[in-house]
């Protein structure tokens, strides 16, 4: 218990440690995600139409845990939650390397999801705790840059590892996450006191307390549109490796380089784009992001070629750069300081649903026709970005009254 009571070295800028952990998460995701569908198809012998369901086991673990422990960092503290979460995710990926058979892999992925359920919202919460509200959008942009830098290194690392075997990405990624948990145990101080406000503490328990979308109609509407947009966007990550491999004969290494390229665009352009769009309305930003993603789908639908694949990755990255910092900033603006982790957990639940519903639907559509995900994605994105932009604009008007 002493490990969770206080760090050996109390670092004075907890949000910087959040940035470091977000880099590690980006590294691990970048090393694993591009090769996961190939591992499932080639090593686990899972039919294409069922690969999304294996993705869903990972997200399903998060969904099972989030209603019960999603906002736990508001009650027991950010530090112990983040240490246990990072270490548990890492240990789970290491276990996945040794798992044999589809059912064993699915069980391990569910356990990983249980630990993952509090990882991202707690990182966001630490950054929000330790920085002023006026800086949150910029700080969340920095987080995306850190994640993008990790996502560049991740596929490159994965490309080297898969030469020995597709499963080696799990062993390496898990080891890095465990190392991240150790860094937190040594250096991270508690930030919950920084978020204290003048409101009376309420002893709220139960499902509705942990998922404030059931109580805050503004948040519920916002998250509904975020979910639709995320489902369509997730088809790029879930389907593109299969699309590139099956339709264009690209190797696993080439797919890794492609994902690293997309992460590089995010890393290089994120801060500049955030500054460029600083004075633009949320509606303008979301419609611009939707236009970029729709154009990517049109290219993939019209002409399957390596060149259009690269262009689609660029446009997808551009879309992610526009909406990435905007959404957590809007959610944090709605949240009382004492429930900051809880609101971020609600956003994380939506991300979990994206991770479950998105790959499952995307790969199922791909199994019917390799063009179907892009054809269905176009109207879905248009609907989602319009609704999201209007919801964000309404929130801004309410805050300015």
Image: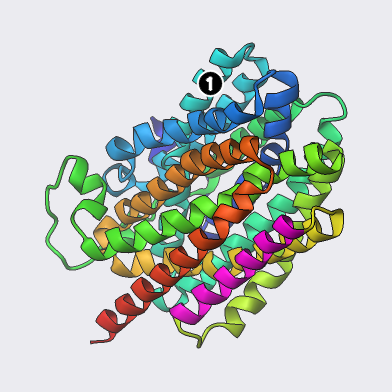
Image quadrant of residue 182? Answer: top right
Residue at horizontal 86%, vertical 44%? 254
Residue at horizontal 39%, vertical 53%? 347
- Residue 144 lies, with reference to residue 235, above or below; the image says below
Q: Does residue 96 appear to the left or right of 382 in the view shown?
A: right
Image quadrant of residue 303? Answer: bottom right
Q: Does the stretch in magenta take in 290?
A: yes
On the image, the x and y values in percent for residue 350 come to 40, 49
* Closer to us: 9 or 139: 139
Q: Residue furthest top?
A: 100
Instruction: Determine crowd level at label 1: few under 14, some 14-19, many 20+ residues with C-alpha closer than 10 A.
Output: many
Q: Which of the image's four quarters has the N terminus?
A: top left
Which secondary structure dominates the residues rendered in magenta? helix
Q: Which of the image's four quarters has the C terminus?
A: bottom left
Image quadrant of residue 302? Answer: bottom right
On the image, the x and y values in percent for residue 162 come to 82, 30
Report the residue marked by disc 1: 106
The local secondary structure at tag 1 comes to: helix
Residue at horizontal 50%, vertical 33%? 56
* Closer to us: 275 or 231: 231
Q: Does residue 364 appear to the left or right of 134 in the view shown?
A: right
Q: Does residue 207 appear to the left or right of 31 in the view shown?
A: left
On the image, the x and y values in percent for residue 376 come to 55, 53
Q: Which stretch did the figure color magenta?
A: 282-302
Q: Does the stretch in magenta take in 196?
A: no
Residue 259 visible at all: yes
Residue at horizontal 34%, vertical 51%? 346
On the image, the x and y values in percent for residue 206 come to 17, 40
- Residue 329 lies, with reference to residue 355, above or below; the image says below
């Amino acid at each position: 218990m002493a490990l969770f009571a206080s760090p050996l070295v109390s670092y004075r800028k907890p949000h910087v440690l959040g940035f470091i952990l977000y880099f590690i998460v980006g590294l691990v995701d970048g090393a694993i995600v591009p090769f996961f569908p190939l591992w499932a198809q080639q090593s686990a012998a899972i039919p294409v139409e069922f690969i999304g369901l294996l993705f869903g086991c990972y997200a399903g673990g998060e969904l099972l845990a989030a209603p019960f422990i999603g906002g736990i960092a508001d009650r027991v503290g950010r530090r112990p939650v983040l240490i246990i979460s990072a270490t548990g995710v890492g240990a789970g990926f290491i276990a996945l390397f040794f798992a044999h058979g589809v059912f064993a892999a699915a069980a391990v992925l569910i356990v990983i999801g249980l630990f993952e359920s509090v990882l991202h919202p707690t990182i966001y919460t630490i950054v929000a705790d330790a920085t002023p509200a006026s800086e949150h959008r910029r700080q969340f942009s920095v987080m995306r840059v850190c994640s993008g830098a990790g996502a560049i290194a991740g596929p490159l690392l994965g490309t080297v590892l898969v030469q020995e075997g597709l499963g080696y990405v799990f062993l390496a990624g898990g080891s890095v996450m465990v190392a991240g948990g150790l860094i937190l145990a040594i250096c991270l101080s508690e930030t919950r006191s920084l978020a204290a406000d003048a409101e009376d503490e309420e002893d709220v328990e139960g499902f509705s307390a942990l998922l404030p979308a059931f109580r805050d109609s503004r948040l519920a509407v916002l998250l509904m549109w975020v979910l639709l947009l995320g489902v369509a966007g997730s088809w790029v990550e879930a389907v593109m490796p299969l699309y590139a491999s099956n339709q264009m004969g690209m190797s696993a290494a080439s797919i890794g380089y492609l994902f690293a390229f997309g992460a590089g665009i995010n890393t290089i352009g994120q801060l500049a784009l955030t500054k460029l769009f600083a004075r633009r309305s949320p509606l303008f930003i979301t419609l611009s992001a939707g236009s970029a993603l729709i154009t990517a789908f049109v290219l993939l639908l019209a002409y399957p070629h390596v060149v259009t694949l690269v262009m689609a990755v660029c446009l997808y990255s551009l879309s992610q750069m526009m909406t990435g910092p905007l959404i957590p900033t809007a959610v944090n603006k709605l949240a009382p300081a004492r429930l900051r982790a809880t609101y971020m957990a609600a956003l994380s639940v939506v991300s979990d649903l994206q991770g479950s519903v998105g790959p499952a639907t995307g790969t199922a559509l791909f199994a019917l026709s390799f063009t179907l995900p892009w054809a269905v994605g176009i109207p879905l994105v248009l609907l989602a970005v319009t609704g999201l932009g209007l919801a964000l604009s309404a929130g801004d008007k309410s805050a300015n009254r």
